[in-house]
Image (tube, grey):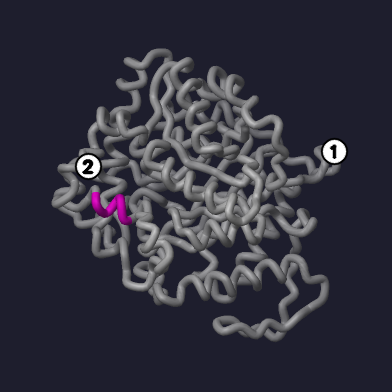
């Protein structure tokens, strides 16, 4: 199994009464809450944490894209990934990802991902999300009913820009370019860097991943118990399409807090978990489901997106019944796995096998978790949990993993000391 360290880069100093005085953490969060000088320290702490995770031996470090968002400070994950490309050596760089429909022209994504792949020596995983309605329809003003058509056309253009050897013209519905000829081009050219698709449960996305032979990643805020139905649906769809059950076709996001004992874990991780579920998922329901965003097939299947669920939690009418913002309910619901190393090993093995997921993306920093606690959680998981779960799915080939240049063929980079930086 591959174990990947994921960072959302949350703003860690939202006020205690945030969810009472402010309608939403996303789209219209007020600028007065953002202190750029504090963000300077947050960004540098977050990047130290990603570099430290790489040194601890995680298979990949992961970043993603959000806009106008108090729990995700990465409108451009490519900026972070390009820095990480220089400060890490062997870890895969998973950019999860670039919302293709927002880029004009989309060849900008083809170029920047090719740059990261070249700088890193071929370690890029290219993520292509459709994007949440808050990011795409509200923050960036896209028409929700046209979003998927725009996304698919952008995908076709990026893929052709990576693989077509000759200069070509592209005449699409949304994009027209007389000359497409990107420089640089990705190192991974057989045929292109691995493409992973993050999603929230859309049936069309499952089918498309199967048809294109891409990895489907379910980025769930609500843990493995809530994710079981979605992943079972994904595997049933794979069976219908005649695909095997190779667990590396799938990725899943899980919050984790490990300590020497369960009591210590509760002491360390209660505040950051309650901060995340109480403030960072305080999404106003008016932003969650714009007309035309959810497809008919997904609505018929009764699949609720992560965003819609977050909005329900934030809605006073449903918040009381869900009770998902205190630590007992967060843990009982499986949103965050906590415990001693033995307890976490048992739960991680259960998550991986019950969901049949070979790429497990771990959130070991969440909410307002500080650097020292993040460092502790990251190190303890790497030392006492990772070696006892890595054997899972060893009988399967991971055909969707980066194929970097040989270490001896790569450029030398200046020495750095991430362990010192993380302390």
Q: Main secondary structure of the magenta part?
A: helix
Residue 100 is marked as none
Query: Quadrant of the rendered structure where residue 407 is?
Result: top right
- The location of residue 210, given as percent across then percent down, is 61, 56
Residue 408 is marked as 1
In the rendered image, is residue 307 in sight? yes
137 w.r.t. 34: above or below: below
Q: Along the horizontal axis of the image, is 99 left or right of 243? A: left
Q: Along the horizontal axis of the image, is 310 left or right of 410? A: left
- The location of residue 278, given as percent across then percent down, is 25, 42
Which residue is identified by label 2? Answer: 322
The local crowd at label 2, few if under 14, some if 14 to 19, many if 20 or more residues have their Cα within 10 Å, is some
- Closest to the observer, 370 or 171: 171
- Closest to the observer, 202 or 104: 202
Which region is colored magenta?
308-312
In the rendered image, is residue 79 in sight? no
Query: Quadrant of the rendered structure where residue 416 is?
Result: top right
Residue at 66% in and 46% down: 244
Residue at 58% in and 54% down: 240
Residue at 65% in and 53% down: 242
Element on which disc 1 rests: helix
């Amino acid at each position: 199994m591959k174990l990947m360290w994921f960072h959302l880069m949350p703003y860690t100093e939202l006020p205690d009464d945030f969810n009472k005085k402010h309608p939403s953490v996303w789209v219209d969060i007020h600028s007065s809450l953002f202190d750029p000088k504090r963000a300077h320290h947050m960004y540098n702490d977050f990047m130290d944490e990603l570099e430290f995770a790489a040194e601890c031996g995680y298979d990949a470090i992961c970043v993603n894209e959000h806009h106008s968002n108090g729990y995700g400070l990465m409108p451009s994950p490519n900026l972070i990934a390009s820095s990480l490309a220089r400060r890490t050596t062997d870890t895969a760089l998973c950019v999860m990802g670039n919302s293709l429909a927002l880029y004009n022209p989309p060849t900008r994504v083809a170029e920047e991902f090719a740059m990261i792949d070249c700088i890193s020596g071929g370690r890029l995983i290219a993520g292509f999300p459709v994007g949440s309605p808050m990011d795409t329809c509200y923050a960036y003003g896209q028409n929700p009913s046209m979003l998927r058509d725009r996304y698919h056309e952008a995908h076709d253009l990026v893929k052709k820009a990576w693989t077509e050897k000759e200069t070509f013209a592209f005449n699409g519905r949304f994009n027209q370019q007389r000359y497409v000829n990107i420089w640089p081009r990705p190192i991974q050219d057989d045929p292109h860097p691995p493409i992973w698709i993050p999603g929230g449960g859309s049936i069309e996305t499952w089918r498309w991943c199967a048809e294109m032979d891409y990895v489907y990643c379910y980025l769930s805020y609500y843990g493995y118990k809530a994710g079981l139905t979605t992943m079972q649906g994904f595997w049933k769809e794979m069976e219908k399409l005649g695909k095997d059950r190779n667990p590396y076709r799938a990725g899943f996001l899980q919050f984790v807090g490990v300590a020497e004992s369960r009591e210590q874990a509760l002491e360390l991780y209660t505040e950051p978990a309650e901060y995340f579920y109480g403030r960072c998922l305080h999404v106003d329901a008016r932003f969650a489901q714009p007309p035309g965003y959810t497809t008919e097939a997904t609505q018929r299947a009764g699949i609720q997106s992560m965003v819609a669920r977050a909005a329900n939690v934030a809605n006073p009418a449903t918040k009381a019944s869900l009770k998902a913002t205190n630590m007992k309910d967060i843990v009982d619901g499986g949103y965050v796995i906590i415990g001693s190393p033995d307890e976490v090993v048992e739960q991680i093995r259960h998550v991986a096998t019950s969901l049949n997921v070979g790429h497990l993306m771990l959130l070991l920093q969440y909410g307002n978790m500080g650097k020292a606690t993040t460092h502790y959680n990251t190190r303890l998981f790497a030392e006492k949990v990772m070696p006892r779960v890595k054997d899972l799915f060893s009988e399967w080939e991971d055909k969707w993993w980066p194929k970097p240049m040989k270490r001896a063929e790569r450029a030398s980079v200046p020495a750095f000391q991430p362990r010192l930086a993380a302390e």
